[in-house]
Amino acid sequence: MNASVALADHYAALPAMDQGKLIELRSIVGDDELRAMLDLLPVEGRRAIEAIEAARVAGDMDRARRAAHGLKGLAGNFGAQRIEAVARYIEHGANAIEELDRLLPILASALEDMRVGIASAS
């Protein structure tokens, strides 16, 4: 098994969405407000991933880390555990810009899984 597959498998084992977190948020803000926030989550997640990609293309690891930091917070607030974990690794563990070549497809897949998780939560 190559390193990229092993890494993808590692993150795939994490839940895309923490349903308990969504229940908690629903109890705080109500159904309508939660739905409105969740509708924006994939859009904002995509923007953050695009910022990390732009930083990769520019060879700017500091910029990638800053974008990952924002994505980590966004994902964590809504219980998107897989995205949060990958973003945390980019922010704190990735040492070379080349690592993003393996991590960005994992983030894109996690974003799609999160979108599906949000749709199933409604």
Image: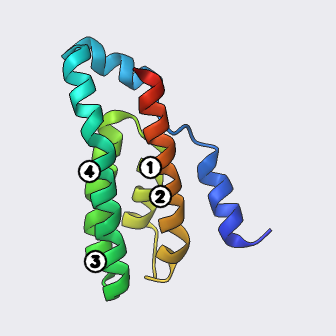
Amino acid type at mark 4: Glu
**What SS does tag 3 mark?**
helix
Instruction: Determine crowd level at label 4: few under 14, some 14-19, many 20+ residues with C-alpha closer than 10 A.
Output: some
| Residue at mark 4 | 44
Amino acid type at mark 2: Leu
Which comes before the other along the chain, label 2 or label 3?
3
**What SS does tag 2 mark?**
helix
Amino acid type at mark 3: Asp
State how far apart marks 2 and 3 are (Cα): 18 Å
State how far apart marks 3 and 4 are (Cα): 20 Å
State how far apart marks 4 and 2 are (Cα): 13 Å
| Residue at mark 2 | 107
**What SS does tag 4 mark?**
helix
The furthest residue to the bottom: 59
| Residue at mark 3 | 62
- Give yes or no for contact between labels 4 and 2 (Cβ–Cβ under 8 Å): no
Q: Quadrant of the N terminus?
A: bottom right
Q: Position of residue 65 (x, y in %)?
A: 31, 69
Please give left or right for residue 32 compared with residue 103 in the image.
Answer: left
Please give left or right for residue 62 compared with residue 117 in the image.
Answer: left
**Residue shown at the point (29%, 16%) measured from the top left:** 26
Q: Quadrant of residue 56?
A: bottom left
**What SS does tag 1 mark?**
helix
